[in-house]
Amino acid sequence: MSKYKLFLLRHGEGAWNKENRFCSWVDQKLSEDGLKEAQDCGRLLKEQGYKFDLVFTSLLSRSIQTAWLVLEAMGQEWVPVIKSWRLNERHYGSLIGLNRAEMAKEHGEEQVKVWRRSYNVTPPPIEESHPYFLEIYNDRRYTTCDVPKENLPRAESLKEVLDRLLPYWDSTVVPEIKQGRTVLISAHGNSCRALLKHLEGISDKDIASVTLPTGIPVLLELDENLKPVKPRQLLGDQVKIQAAIKKVEDQGKAIPST
């Protein structure tokens, strides 16, 4: 029997989602389409009668901006928003800033799929010479973390995302849910996928085929032990959702030469 409701949301489309680049820890704002996705998501949740008590986001602007727009559309701007680096997107290391389709052409679609979707393959780490290294590690937001800046990741597999996310989930999010609060986690494709893997017991192999489109809320109904009592529900127009999933899956395909 369902005791708790948990909502996961991959942020609305960001500027680099649109350009098909590995964004990761580079701080990008939402694109025009992303702003609309977040507002539409909030309107949908309001229409369906949902009310949040607490929202958790990453430290990245696209995650926070999405949460703000969702709450505004719901008329729930007063709901507390708590931010943590532990909900950040997966750190793609030296791949940050690169175009996925161009990489597929150079390295092959299978290799890009391994980098994007495998559970325990870590990409090459970001070096100090990387064009976005200083932009990330000199950012003041990372002085607020619960670990020293020098101990923050330089590259991560999905497994490593789950490893840094789980302590926060267990210590901070779970107690709120168990007090009966309805929680929204407005985060990223990989931090949400990592949490889904944990909650649903998805295998290392099968997690590669789990795709979350931007701006689509995912409803999980959980029992008293926070185990799902029914399959996850992606809320909204199902035809549009399937098209959005295909769009994400196609990002790692090479663009044919013309």
Image: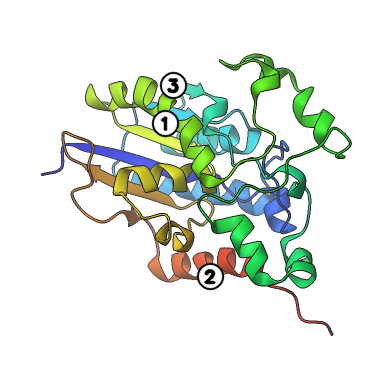
Up-down relation of residue 253 to residue 219 (above or below): below
Which residue is denoted by mark 2 in the rendering?
246
Looking at the image, which residue is at 67% across and 39% down?
A: 155
Looking at the image, which residue is at 84% across and 85% down?
A: 258
Which residue is denoted by mark 3 in the rendering?
78
Closer to us: mark 3 or mark 2?
A: 2
As drawn, is 1 to the left or to the right of 71? Answer: left
Count residues near mark 2 (Cα–Cα under 10 Å), then give few for <14, some for 14-19, many for 20+. Answer: some
Distance CA(mark 1)–CA(mark 2) = 29 Å
Any part of residue 94 in sight: yes
Which element type, helix, strand or loop, lies under badge 2? helix
Which element type, helix, strand or loop, lies under badge 3? loop
Q: Would you identify the image quadrant in which residue 130 lies?
A: top right
Looking at the image, which residue is at 52% across and 38% down?
A: 161
- Nearest the viewer among 205 and 230 is 205
Distance CA(mark 3)–CA(mark 1) = 27 Å
Closer to us: mark 3 or mark 1?
A: 1
- First of labels 3, 2 by sequence position: 3
Which residue is denoted by mark 1 in the rendering?
166
Which element type, helix, strand or loop, lies under badge 1? helix
- First of labels 1, 2 by sequence position: 1
Dot 2 amino acid type? Lys
What is the quadrant of the N terminus in the image?
top left
Rendering coords of residue 126 (x, y %): 77, 39
Dot 1 amino acid type? Leu
